[in-house]
Image: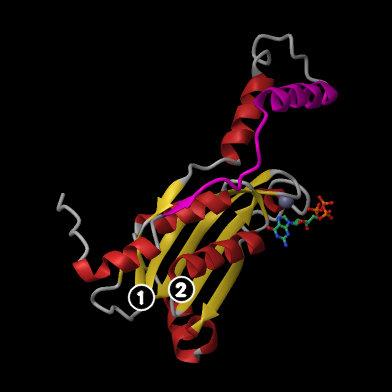
Amino acid sequence: MTPAPSPAAGHDAREASRPHLRVAGTHPAVDPAAAEAAAAALLAALGLDLTAEHLARTPHRMAQALIEMTSSEDFELTTFPNDEGYDELVLVRDIPVQSVCEHHILPFTGVAHVGYLPGERILGLSKFARMVEWHARRPQTQERLTHQIATHLDDALGPRGVGVVVQAEHTCMTLRGARVAGTATTTSALFGRLREDPRSRAEFLALTRSTP
Ligand SMILES: Nc1nc2c(ncn2[C@@H]2O[C@H](COP(=O)(O)OP(=O)(O)OP(=O)(O)O)[C@@H](O)[C@H]2O)c(=O)[nH]1
Ligand SMILES: [Zn+2]
């Protein structure tokens, strides 16, 4: 692997003024023991016999599964100075989205397309996926998830434009309730030039629709 080039001396001050942002600390505290006790109570209320061997550890597994689906790892949101003055769209497509709808606590899954028009700083490419996962792995609405990713990118980089499109299938709508298998929901959040400039907006939306 090629080592990352060290920043030019002139950029040291700017690098220090926007340190690698640690994304952490806003997830609520989790109490696994209380979650397990609550899962046992729910399963018993559903008429399950928790003394059966298959079910004995189900409250534990159920609590752990829900905790895993609503927790994500903290990470460093590494940004770099835009030394080359790159000013075209950067778009990372088809980032997996695995979230849980906060109305039914059932999964919704799909993809996110996240892009921006760089200003003074650019983002490490893997951080787009980490950012999506960090916001997705908690009880969410798709609209809020989409907006939070866009706001996060906007705050971290101060770019000229930000665009986020999320396409997802909600199991609360496909497996129960309306039971409309195969339906997909698309949400978008566009900021700056990607919202206001019709050509940039059209280019971004077209790229999120085209096949790679
Ligand atoms: N806007 C939005 N709605 C969502 C999302 N996830 C789930 N929902 C909806 O939340 C709504 C909750 O409505 P309720 O009428 O209280 O719930 P319900 O009786 O289970 O409704 P049905 O799902 O229609 O059976 C449903 O229409 C869900 O489809 C989301 O991410 N965004
Ligand atoms: Zn739901």
Q: Amino acid at mark 2?
A: Gly
Callout 2 touching callout 1 (CB < 8 Å): yes
Q: Position of residue 85 (x, y in %)?
A: 28, 79
- Which element is circle 2 on? loop
Viewer-side residue, 210 vs 99: 99
Residue lying at 48% horizontally and 44% vertically, measured from the top left: 74
- Which element is circle 1 on? loop
Determine which residue is flagged by label 2. 158
In terms of sequence position, does the residue under pointer 2 or pointer 1 come before the other?
Answer: 1
Is residue 33 highlighted in magenta?
yes
Residue lying at 16% horizontally and 49% vertically, measured from the top left: 1
Q: Position of residue 66 (x, y in %)?
A: 63, 35
Q: Position of residue 17 (x, y in %)?
A: 39, 64
Query: In the image, ligand 1 is in what quadrant?
Result: bottom right
As drawn, the label of residue 197 is: none
Outermost bottom residue: 198
The residue stretch that appears in magenta: 21-46
- Compared to residue 162, the image places residue 101 above or below, namely above
- Compared to residue 62, the image places residue 89 above or below, namely below
Determine which residue is flagged by label 1. 120
Determine which quarter of the picture holds residue 15.
bottom left
Viewer-side residue, 187 vs 38: 38
Is residue 1 highlighted in magenta?
no
Residue lying at 60% horizontally and 28% vertically, measured from the top left: 64
